[in-house]
Every structure is written in C-alpha cells, then in structure tokens.
Image (cartoon, rainbow, N blue to C red):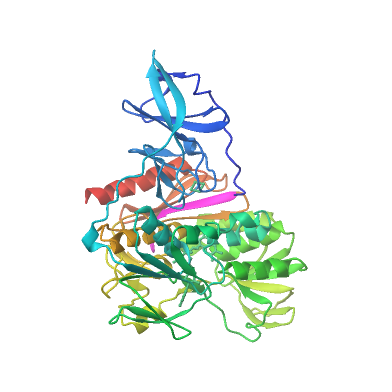
Amino acid sequence: MAENQANSNGPDFALGIASAELADGGMLAGHVGDEQVLLTRIGEQVFAVAALCSHYHGPLAEGLVVGETVRCPWHHACFSLRTGEAIGAPAFSPIDCWSVERRDGKVFVTAKRAVARPASRLSAGSVPDRIVIVGGGAAGFAAAQTLRNEQYRGSIVMLSNDDAAPVDRPNLSKDYLAGTAPEEWIPLKPDDFYAENGIELRLKTNVAAIDAQSREVALADGSKVPYDRLLLATGAEPARLSFPGSDQPHVHTLRSLADCRAIVERAKTARRVVVMGASFIGLEVAASLRERKIEVHVVAPDKRPMERILGPGIGDFVRSLHEEHGVVFHLEDTVSAIDGKRMTLKSGGTIEADFAVMGVGVRPRVELAERAGLVVDRGVVVDAYLETTGPGIFAAGDIARWPDPHSGQPIRVEHWVVAQRQGKTAALNMLGLRQKFVDVPYFWSQHYDIPINYVGHAEKWDELAIDGDIASKDCLLRFKLEGRTLAVASIFRDVASLQEEAAMERVTAAR
Ligand SMILES: Cc1cc2nc3c(=O)[nH]c(=O)nc-3n(C[C@H](O)[C@H](O)[C@H](O)COP(=O)(O)OP(=O)(O)OC[C@H]3O[C@@H](n4cnc5c(N)ncnc54)[C@H](O)[C@@H]3O)c2cc1C
Ligand code: FES
C-alpha cells in the first residue's frame, strides 16, 4: 500500500476509441466518467473491466492477460475478464465490468453491467451439513468465503484462538508497522461480514483436540463441535530463541495483530531496537521501524541476508539497501543474552537497545493433526486435493505439505497467497467439487519502496541466471536445477514475473 495508487486517465472510452488501437491480447487503460477502466481484446471479444486491482489497487494495465483473465502486476491476483470475479488470491473482491459496443470501426464502453451469479455447482447428495474450520487466518478465511461464494448453505463454524477476526497479516510487518496504514486496512472484512454471511466466527477459542472417529473437535473449555468436513488451517507460530533473558516482555515476536500492536506501542518511546534474523520478517520489521526513525541493529548468523532463498546477489543488494536506510548489520553473530537494555552478542560485543524483535523463522502448528493420528512429515501431509490422511479432514496453508506438480516434490511453504489459494481449493473439495491444487507458489516481500516477487519453489539450485542488473533494481533471476527453471525472483520486472508464472502453469497443464 505504500505502493502508490495507480493513476491512469487515458482516453475517454465513453467517446470511443478506434478499434485498431486495441491489438489482439493488448490492454489499454482509460476512463469512463470518473472511473478508471481497462479495455482488452482477445480475438474478436473486447472486455472492459475496472483498471485497478481490488487487492491494493495495482494497475491491471501493467499486468498480463492470460486466456480470459488479467493478472495484477503487484501480487499476482487473477480476475476473470468476462465476469470480474477474483479467481486468484490475494484479491477476493470482484472488479466491475462494463458493457462494450463496437460500431463504425470504434469501440465504446457504455454502462457498468451487472454480472449474473452463476448457478450453484453443488449437487445435493454430496454436500456436507456442517463444516468446521480451525484457524482464522489466510487459509481459513479464504475457505469460509469460498464456501459461501459457492452458495453452500450449510453451517460454517470458524474457530480461532486469535482475538482478532482475520487480518491482512503481510501488512503487519510492512505499512501498518511503519505507521503508514490506517486501522481499516487491516481486517480482511468488516466485523459484520461474518454474521451477514452466516459464518459463525468464534474468536479466542482454542481447539484442543480432534476426534476423527466421532467427527468432533474438542475445545479447550471442554465443549465439542461436531463436523462433517474439517479444515485445519492453524498456520505457524514464530520460533523463539532461548538464551538468558530471551523471555522478557521487551523481546517480541510477530505473528498476530496483537503482536504488531505491542511492537508499535514499544516503538513509540524507543530509540534503538535489535532485530534478530535477517530474513523476510526480520528485514521487513527493520525497514518499518526505520520509517519510525528508530535506530535498527540486525543480528543474524547468516553471511548474507536472504541468501538461502534468493541467492548471494539479492542478499548483497538487500543488505546495501537496508544500510542505505541506516540499518546496522551484525552478521555471522547471534544474541547470547539480554539483561534489560543490554544485549550481548556471541562475538562479545554489546548493544544497548530499548527492545528486541525475533524474526527467526516459524514452526507449523501441527500438534492437533499429530494428536489426531494424521500423517505429519515436516507438515501435515495432504494429497493433491488437500485432504489429509484422515477422511473428511483437509489442511491448507502454512501447515500443509502437498504434492507440488511443478517441482514434482511434496513441499510446504509459508506464503500468504498460497495459503489463501489452498483455502479456496480445500473449500471446493469439502463441497465435493474435486479440484487439484496446482497453483504455482508465489510470494512477495517489500523493503522500503522495493518489492521482491518470487514465483515457483527452489530448495536448491545448480545455476542462477540473472537477466538485467540487481543493483539497478531491474532484474529477474532464474533458479535452475539440471537446466530446468524451478523458480524466478524479480525486482521491477512484473510482467516477466507473470509470464514466468503463466509458463510454469502451462507446463503443469500439459503434463
Ligand atoms: C508479519 C508477517 C508478514 C508476512 N508477510 C508476508 C508476505 O509479504 N508475503 C507472503 O507471501 N507471506 C507473508 N507472510 C506469511 C503469511 O502470512 C502466512 O503464510 C499465512 O498467513 C499463512 O496462512 P495460514 O492460514 O496457514 O495461517 P495463519 O494466517 O497464521 O492463520 C492461522 C490461524 O489459526 C489459528 N489457530 C492456530 N492454532 C489454533 C488452535 N489450536 N485453535 C484455534 N485456532 C488456532 C490462529 O489464531 C490463526 O487465526 C507473513 C507473515 C507474517 C507473520
Ligand atoms: S494490488 Fe493486485 S494483487 Fe495486490
């Protein structure tokens, strides 16, 4: 959201444009009255939809048309050009559609058009009466919304041990932490959304156990909630380093809105912070706290930030970017003790800091699944339909290890968009609409005004090919193994990143 609101006035489509101005597969941004509109042509079909993405208002004209969809350049949301439907997270709300007329060699955009809701795809016999979702995060929210979008009329109970309704978690280390996002950006939906959509959201509700035989979940207060289908979407919890003084209240971790607010409160009077960890969360926290003018020291055992995922080139770039913004790195070092403000490093140095934030990785919350006897192997094992080894029990998001068709490996990732898309797929499968999860993994990270996009999954690679120049903030890196591109990372190469994603999708579809 620090990402600027896109602004494209362009031609007035109500007055018409020459048909020749719109190439096949091309996009043109313009307006109708005050509203920004995107015009696309696919063969003889011309579509007019809202020009801004319903996620963070990314400029869709700078994205990519794939089939009858348009993909957003910023975080890869996908919309149907025909209906405006948000087909792919992170967007959930549809975009508007307009009617188009073609006459006298010109294309005119006329009125906004209502899109009829498609007939329900559900077949009476196979739809469960009661669906329970454990987790009120990315996957759980996406599942609940999908169930209602599919016109499921049965009961949905969403159990979350958080005290906040589903929030835009990625923002908690970015604009919200930096103090540049208003409160209303944080909830994924207003509070009344859940009641209005018949979703029984029970906050501060800890699920203690699952009885797969009797199809019930047991809550910490001893009560039981029966289910016909169950979705486990318990996410992950931040790892905590253990050393003398590590459990003091001024040593924070960041996962929930409450965690974020506690850091914001601390930051109000702080002059200096130690951030432990030089990966995504740690460095996003560092950037956001620099925006609050706090002196930031990053302590991490790595030689370079983010090297394990993004390679040495981006690692060096990210380090200099943060140094340009005043961050001080203490790499190949760790905090060994905290005594009040005095933070002692393994190397022997000390830093006087008002508080500390640990961003040292997360652990998937798999205990419920383990205790229920489901197969857990570095994550809850699911099949291509995201069903666990317990019949009727599905898993999605940070806890799920699924057979990824791109890498050909079972993988588990911690990506917002993957969790949302898996929540959606799991919901469809709970309704009996058999759909494999085949989406290409995608995540983004933001440091100051620099976004890094990553498509695919490469745990290791033997070749790293760089297009463009990392230092000039204009690059696309291909992580290859035995000649095959497993993943690409990019900075300000949004269309190329989308093209790579579409190419990976085509490979899977062809298999
Ligand atoms: C600060 C931050 C920034 C991030 N930024 C990015 C980013 O920029 N890009 C990106 O791709 N990813 C990002 N991520 C990762 C992303 O947020 C996660 O991958 C995603 O939230 C996972 O979704 P999930 O539904 O699996 O879990 P979560 O969103 O964590 O939701 C899990 C839910 O389960 C509940 N729960 C857990 N156990 C129980 C229980 N026993 N009983 C009841 N409820 C329970 C929790 O309270 C929570 O509501 C970020 C994560 C954090 C913390
Ligand atoms: S702004 Fe479009 S996906 Fe985020």
Q: Residue at x 46, y 19 (%)?
A: 17
Closest to the observer, 302 or 122: 122
Residue 136, compared with residue 320, is above or below; it is below
Number of labels in the image equals: 0
Question: Which residue, as the protein is rendered here, is positioned at the far top?
Answer: 104
Q: Is residue 59 above or below residue 487?
A: above
Measured as percent of width and height from the top left, residue 219 is found at 44, 81
Residue 14 on image: x %, y %: 50, 22
For the record, the magenta segment spans 450-461
Q: Is residue 46 above or below residue 174?
A: above
Question: Residue 254: x percent and y percent?
Answer: 58, 69
Residue 455 painted magenta? yes
Residue 462 image-quadrant placement: bottom left
The answer to whether residue 314 of the structure is visible from this angle is yes
Residue 500, placed above or below residue 82: below
Q: Is residue 476 magenta?
A: no
- State the image quarter where residue 270 is shown: bottom right
Image position of 126 (left or right of 237): left
Residue 477 lies left or right of residue 386; in this view the side is right
Residue 175 appearing in the image: no
The residue drawn where x is 56% and y is 27% is 33
Where is residue 57? Give x, y as percent: 54, 43
Viewer-closest of 499 and 328: 499
The reply, left or right, for residue 219 in relation to residue 238 is: left
Left or right, 234 with reference to 302: left
